[in-house]
Amino acid sequence: MILFFISLFFGCTKKSTQSETSIDSRDSLSKYLSLANNFDLPSEQREKYIQKAFKIIRPQENDSLHRVNLFKVANRYYNLENWKEYKRMVRLVLEKSAMKQDAFSMAKGNNYLGDYYDSQGIPDSSFLYYDKAEKMYVELNDDYNLAKTIIKKANIQFNQSDFLGSEKAASKALKIIKNTNQSDVLYDAYNLLGLIYNELEDYDNAMVYHKRALASIDDELMASFYQPKATSYNNIGYLYLKREKYQQAKSYFQKGLVQKNISRDKPYIYAMLLNNLAYSKFKLHEKEKLPDLFFKSLKIRDSLQLTAGIIASKINLSEYFISKKDTAQASQYAKQALELSQKTDNYRNVLNSLKQLSVIEPQNAAVYANDYIKVSEKLQKSERKMGNKFTRIEYETEEIKSENTDLVQQNRNLLYFFTGLAMLGLFSFVIKTQKAKNRELLFKQQQQMANEEIYNLMISQQNSIEINRIKEKKRVARELHDGVLGRMFGVRINLDSLNKILDETAVEKRNNYLTELKNIEQDIREISHDLNREKSELINNFVAIVDNLFEEQKKTHKSKFVSSIDPAIKWELVSNSLKINFYRILQEALQNINKYANANIIKIELKKVEDHLILKITDDGIGFNVKTARKGIGLQNILFRAKECDGVFDIKSSKGEGTIITVTAPIE
């Protein structure tokens, strides 16, 4: 009995102690993780708290809470920029996630590995892991994390100058989170699109997206630690800097610099704002705090080892000292920028440095220009290679995914087979129906060709008659002019000579005869001219035929009809084929307007522009959908005739807006 009670006492004591230890460990873990993320503490102290937290987490059971805590530890290492431990922790959580088939944690782990390789400047590996995470988030239907991952891929493409690929990815992310309140993803997408359009020198679009990014910031949802406002103010200011609006640029950089804790939370943005503010003041010829602002920015960038920022600062300092006529310092900073750019294989900054040196040392401009061309070619090849690599990565991961789904696809083949049979039957029905319609259309076209042959014969016959009439009229005109008119002129001369006789009565009579002869002479001349004028009118029998068509239209239909035919057109030089096709187009168009358009006004214009005939048919009717109506027989006939005369057919119409048909054909 004594032994029983002793064991019971110690057992209860042990159980109570374990329970207290468990509660204590949870409290300690929360405390250590919180302290590890306290940015006011020294880095060494924060790392010790991370290690203490990991000691508590490591022996825990591999459940979802355990994996969440491992991700928290990885996050703390990321914030400390301890990349070795960060990568080790992510690999560990991926291993544990695979053991439990935790798809969400595996997607998140791949995302974290993408972050790691991005921090190490290995864009292709980073892109690969982001792409893996993207595929997993698609399967999980997790739109928020999917959009965030696509934005990360887009950022890599942007940094590698694959601007079109980056723009496509950012737009895809926006489409995914459309109609949601995910302000952080929305901000990242808008901000990135602004940066892309800035690089593409589309400054108007860049300004639109940067202002959208600024407007999308939700102070409650987006932690101030990320300093989104300072980032947007810097980007908008930089756009004004590009447009040489230095006063507006300066005001935005100043807005960014007054953001709370900007120098502590985002020192690289703070350094960027300082440098850009200094450059704005320099361009505005303001001497205050210059060049101190440039040096302050350079110092921060140097401490953070921001290579691209250091190069930009040194190029700006070089430009500043050129303005101060200090060529030695200007050359020194430009050469330092060039050396650093070459070491890091940053071709864009190499180009900027060479450009700056060619300004400072004009005597060596030819050498720098030659280097500039070589580096520019390298840059183009590098950007093309990286863009192809990203495409290949996406393709290869898609192939792997395709291979994994082959088994599922085989199970669906039977369903697809029966669906295919049903579709085949439907297609057969559609094809038969279409063939019947095509036969009908072919029959109508053959009818029209027969009509054209008859019309050609009619035109040729009428032309022969008109030519004979014109010849006869010309003969009569010559007879009148050369025969009758000549003889009458002789009579007038003789009578005029008789006026020398002094008999007053004879003189008066002769004057009357002379006046009458002059009147007859004028009448004959006018008749002769009229006969010759009829030539041009009669030979244009095509115009007469078209006029008959127009008159018939006016008599038969109530629509107001306005026509205009260019008198400069020499119809005798226009081929019969072209005239026939234009006439048939007019007929078809008027028939369609009368039948369907319900138009109040119809306008026909036929004119010559250089060596082309242009037929324009306009109505103010109800209009129609051009895409669906192009299948109609009437419009098909017009299109066919336009092609027959090597012409171009254009139609513009929309519901309620009327219709404009234009046919342009060359005159052979």
Image: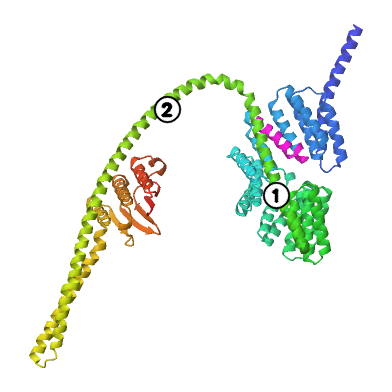
Residue 526, compared with residue 427, is above or below; it is below
Residue 322 belongs to magenta span: no
Q: Which amino acid does label 1 sit on?
A: Glu
The image quadrant that residue 501 belongs to is: bottom left
Q: In this picture, which residue range is highlighted in magenta?
A: 116-136
Question: Which label number is shown at residue 377?
Answer: 1
Tag 1's secondary structure?
Answer: helix
Please tell me which residue is depicted at 27% across the width and 52% down the height of the picture: 559
Residue 567, compared with residue 504, is above or below; it is above
Within 10 angstroms of label 2, few (less than 14), some, or many (20 or more) residues? few
Image quadrant for the N terminus? Answer: top right
Residue tagged 2: 427
Image quadrant for the C terminus? Answer: bottom left
- Does any portion of residue 276 appear in the rendered image? no
Q: Which amino acid does label 2 sit on?
A: Phe
Residue 212, compared with residue 407, is above or below; it is below
The image quadrant that residue 504 belongs to is: bottom left
